[in-house]
Image (spheres, helix red, strand yellow):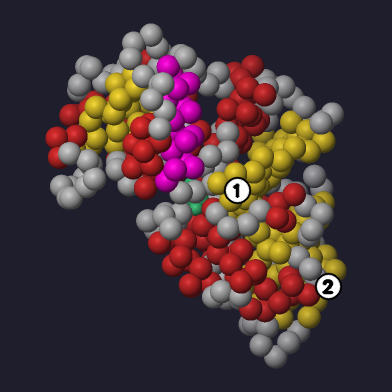
Amino acid sequence: MNEKLKIGLFGYGVVGQGLYDVLQSTPAFDATIDKIVVKEKKQRNLPDGMFFYSPDDILEDPDINVVVELIDNSEDAYRIVKKALKKGKSVVSANKKMLAEHLEEMVQLQKENNVSLLYEASACGSIPIIRSLEEYYDNDLLLSVTGILNGSSNYILSNVFDHNQSYEEALKEAQNLGFAESDPSFDVEGYDSLYKLIIITLHSFGAIVKPENVLTYGISNINEFDINYAREKRFKIKLVGQVERLHDQNISLFVLPRFVGKDKYIYSVEEEFNGVVVKGKAYDKQFMFGKGAGGHPTSSAVLSDITALAHNYKYEYKKLNYFKKFSYFKDGAVEIYLRYSDSAILKHFAFESISEEYKGPEYSYKIGFIKLSDLIKINRLLREMDIFIALTGKKLNY
Ligand code: HSE
């Protein structure tokens, strides 16, 4: 883009305000936020004249050449981003839900309108995972991407494990610090990690997978029994998203809590930090670590996208456009720990084998292999039952 960047910003929450601050600290970069569209009038730390209340105040303004979308509501975000792209404006978005649900259309809209949509901030806050997957891991050596993709749930697990805080207290803190989504069930039930994983999967393997087809289970049912079990075995429990290349051009993906030992890179990822392990042929494993939530860290990724636009950067979607297609394989078996109190729930679990079990007066558990596809079938039920499941890390039939 040879012209000066004139930004229309949607949303002035934690990340929007962070972006305003971060832009002030980079005076060498010639971009200005000219208008900010917000939902309602209220006292803010910028002059009233900066704020507008209708999306068209930005979308129909021919002087604005970049739209930065940092709002919470994914349906509004979808309408805004779609219209902006159709109007020939480049867009930076951090809305992982909107992106994950409309990836195919977003790729198409960029092509049809010859514009760029960048979204580094949508996955893992300040960690440049998307551009790295697109530009550095741009060959077929890549084997898997595994990571702690949600800062809030990691903040909770970290404080519960290391500081004996209660789950509720830790969640409240994550909300007060601005890490959690407005509906924190997105964080703790694994959906936030899922949306990020869907975006990562496109840039890793070129596959567009529908979120509703992916096994997604979070940490909201964890209890003292599970925590003590993990502590006794010297594990931590982390919420992990993973996409992995399998045999015959297949990939597998899921979001699940996992027992993690000291030998794993993600063992030491604490608080709101995210950590992503990229595994490949030849280079084995690499680890990216950084703040995954919070206004300033996330807005640093937004700023990086804005500066990339100044250099006419676009995602090429190399894996999607130039690589052999991958299919989504759901029939691999994973080993899980299933804690329960009422054995009636066991009828829902088609274990292929059991390696360990315990029956106690209050809680019992089983550890055994089960097919991902069998867990996907009961994904909704998993959240409703009085159980907790976590991966041990062992896999079969991959
Ligand atoms: N709620 C998200 C998290 C914000 O906790 O990671 C960053 O995407």
Question: Quadrant of residue 136 in the image?
Answer: top right
Mark 1 Cβ inside 8 Å of ligand 1: yes
Q: Is residue 105 left or right of residue 50?
A: right
> Camera-side residue: 301 or 197?
301
For the magenta stretch, what is the residue range? 295-310
Secondary structure of the residue carrying tag 1 is: strand
Dot label at residue 356: 2
- Residue at the extreme top of the image, as rendered: 2
Q: Please give the residue where the numbered disc 1 appears in the rendered image.
A: 274
| Residue 117 percent location from the top left of the image | 43, 25
- Residue 105 in view of the camera: no
- Kindly indicate whether the residue at mark 1 contacts the one at mark 2 (C-beta within 8 angstroms): no
> Which residue occupies 36% across, 32% down?
24
Disc 2, SS: strand
Q: Tell me, yes or no, whether the highlighted magenta stretch contains residue 307.
A: yes
In this rendering, position of residue 213 left or right of residue 115: right
Predominant SS along the magenta part:
helix
Q: In the rendered structure, which disc, 2 or 1, sits on the residue that comes first in sequence?
A: 1
Q: Nearer the viewer, residue 333 or 153?
A: 153
Q: Position of residue 353 (x, y in %)?
A: 83, 65
Residue type at mark 2?
Answer: Glu
Label 2 to label 1, Cα distance in Å? 31 Å
Left or right of residue 33, residue 2 in this image: right
- Is 309 magenta? The answer is yes
Of the 4 image quadrants, the one containing the C terminus is: top right
Mark 1: amino acid: Asn
